[in-house]
Amino acid sequence: MSVTSNDFDEQEQEAIKNFRKYLMIPSVHPNINYDKCVEFLQEQADDIGLPCDMYTAVQGKPIVIITWLGTRPELPAVMLNSHMDVVPVYEDKWTHKPFDADMDDEGNIYARGSQDMKNVGIQYLEAIKRLKGLSVKLKRTIHVTFVPDEEIGGEDGMGKFVESDYFKKLNIGVAFDESMASSNDDFITFFGERSTWVFHIHCTGIVGHASNLVDNTAAQKLQFVINKLLNFRESERGKLKTDKNLIISDVTSINLTQIKGGIQANVIPPEFIATFDCRVPVTVDHNEWANTIEQWCKEAGEGVWVEYELKQPRVPVTLLNHSNPYWGALKTAAEELGIKLRTIICPGSTDAKYIRRVGLPAFGFSPMNNTPLLLHGHDEYLNVNVFLRGITIYCKIIETVGNIE
Ligand SMILES: [Zn+2]
């Protein structure tokens, strides 16, 4: 059976139109010009009849804030966040143009950003439009925020935003952000993240002619360090194999991603530098792990040290118990919708880390179930029915969370 526009009512057709329009803006890395996104979002806000403001911490990297005032604006507000940027494409690997937002006969809408995460940005706005249309009034103020640069770390977007006076004045109580598609009936909900560490291990040693077997070379030390770290990697892989309840974000991942050093085949080089990407779970004592790496460098011999390029702090998870009323409200909304939330620690990294870092609860929730995981992949698409259901789901969530006393 094929999907045609007759299958949708007027409201749905408008939502699909807006979704596709947003997808057609190529806000793709690198060097994004966000003007078209800002213009589009301003139009959307006008259309819904909501004020739209802009905050800029770094030139050319605007944050758009669309606000729906609550009847009790003194209560902490609800933030509905999404990022405007998308990752690059290998266009020749796509069967549809990545910024045409084509819909095929099955209702699959193809575009970069259809899952990550222009879908969610539009779902927030369409849900609010629907609630307003039904004359619903919420107690809490809702701020729908659209941020830049999430896909390149978010430092100049959400990173700076949470530190600003502007943000403090918004008096945010809870934030919603992205999660990812789930291949079964469940809806994946993120409540925490691992910390990303990127470090370079410098191994220095004796220089000489490569026809000799001199001791104390950079390579010997490099071998020691790599063995230690990759053996540790194997033990983490072992944990995943033996305990099927564990997922990748429950363990420490570590990967050797670069090795640099040497100038010529017959010269023993003075230094090798090995780069590792490591993701540290919240359950791991960060100091202890750093000490272990330090210790291995020491054991490797003289002239071996670790240099950190990135060492994200440990950020406590958002609590999923009765002490967190926002979690209670989200759970209630899910029960009333008859949907099952699968709460996990995010395997990657999102802007929610910045929100949790300033002590606020944050949930990652992109309502996509029975959908192949295509974020950052070729032929990224979202089925129109999944997209529309997400609006219904967000209507319920916004109403429930927005009415917490
Ligand atoms: Zn994303």
Image (cartoon, helix red, strand yellow):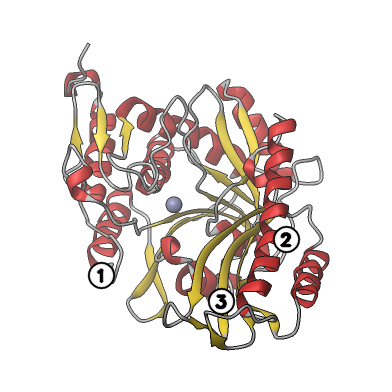
Disc 3 residue type (three-letter): Ile
Secondary structure at badge 1 equals loop
Are discs 2 and 3 less than 8 Å apart at CB?
no
Total marks placed: 3
Q: Residue furthest front?
A: 211
**Residue at horizontal 17 percent and vertical 39 percent from the top:** 96
**Residue at horizontal 29 percent and vertical 52 percent from the top:** 44
Work out whether residue 71 or residue 267 is closer to the camera in this orientation and state it.
267
Compute the Cα span from label 2 to label 1.
45 Å
Disc 1 residue type (three-letter): Asn
| Residue identified by numbered label 2 | 228
Are discs 2 and 1 less than 8 Å apart at CB?
no
Q: Earlier in the sequence, mark 2 or mark 3?
A: 2
Q: Earlier in the sequence, mark 2 or mark 1?
A: 1
Secondary structure at badge 3 equals strand
Compute the Cα span from label 2 to label 3.
15 Å
| Label 3 CB-ligand 1 distance < 8 A | no
| Residue identified by numbered label 1 | 33
Q: Position of residue 270 (x, y in %)?
A: 57, 86
* Quarter assignment of residue 127: top left
Relative to 3, say whether 181 is above or below.
Answer: below
Instruction: Indicate which disc residue 273 carries.
Output: 3
Query: Is residue 86 rendered to the left or right of residue 339?
Result: left
